[in-house]
Amino acid sequence: MTVFLETERLVLRPFADTDADGLLALDNDPDVMRFINGGKPTSYEAIQTQTLPRLLHAYPCFGTRGYWAAEEKATGAFLGWFEFRPLDDHSAAVVELGYRLNKAAWGKGYATEGSRALIRKGFTDLGVERITANTMTVNIRSRRVMEKAGLTFLRDFTGDWPEAIEGSEHGEVEYELTRTDWEQHR
């Protein structure tokens, strides 16, 4: 297994086709998907034809991928994934941070731990200048992770939702962290 990044409790590794079952379980938990699609189920076909190809995409500017399967280091259990994806395939200057973890991993600090490690790697090894993260305004847990990871509120905005879901009427928020701010506060 190729490891992209390790923390005290996590292993972040590239996705493989064998992760389809773990992704299916993750994306079929209504609580996990509440702020993504309103909790609607995802088919195995959608995992194979849409989700996995997106997670397997390589970014030339990184020479690697932008999505990482998260495993608990002690047990090897699949916890979900982290996104640290350049907004431009050919430039590592601005990346989007994201995470989707199963409910068993909630409230244990895994999202913050993985996010901080990715931020550190981005600013020290990958040439990142700015990190951005978005969520629905009402997604308080995700907003708290962003803040604990060092990002600060940038703006409110209204996203283009194909179908409105509960809470989308309140809009979305964007957080950011620049390399300069990170260096000054670490």
Image (cartoon, rainbow, N blue to C red):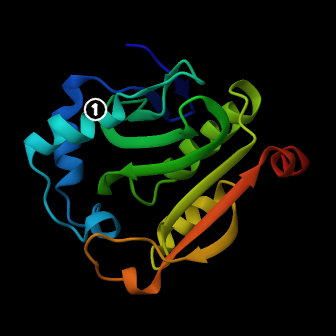
Residue lying at the far right of the rendered structure: 184
Residue 102 position within the rendered picture, expressed as x and y whole percent measured from the top left: 31, 52
Residue lying at the far bottom of the rendered structure: 169
**Residue drawn 47% across the image and 42% down it:** 83
Q: Nearer the viewer, residue 10 or 33?
A: 33
Q: Indicate the quadrant containing the N terminus: top left, top right, bottom left or bottom right.
A: top left
Residue 23 vertical placement versus 142 (above, below): above
Callout count: 1
Residue 47 relative to residue 180: left or right: left
Residue 122 relative to residue 181: left or right: left
Q: Nearer the viewer, residue 170 or 146?
A: 170
Q: Quadrant of residue 70?
A: top left
Q: Secondary structure at mark 1?
A: helix
Residue 104 vertical placement versus 16 (above, below): below
**Residue drawn 86% across the image and 47% down it:** 180
Residue 79 vertical placement versus 12 (above, below): below
Residue 41 vertical placement versus 101 (above, below): below
Residue lying at the far top of the rendered structure: 1
Residue at image mark 1: 53
**Amino acid at pointer 1:** Pro
**Residue drawn 30% across the image and 82% down it:** 166
Q: Nearer the viewer, residue 132 or 30?
A: 132
Residue 169 position within the rendered picture, expressed as x and y whole percent measured from the top left: 39, 86
Q: Nearer the viewer, residue 107 or 86?
A: 86
Residue 157 position within the rendered picture, expressed as x and y whole percent measured from the top left: 55, 76
Residue 83 relative to residue 54: left or right: right
**Residue drawn 18% across the image and 34% down it:** 20
Q: Residues within 10 Å of mark 1 (few under 14, many from 20)?
A: some
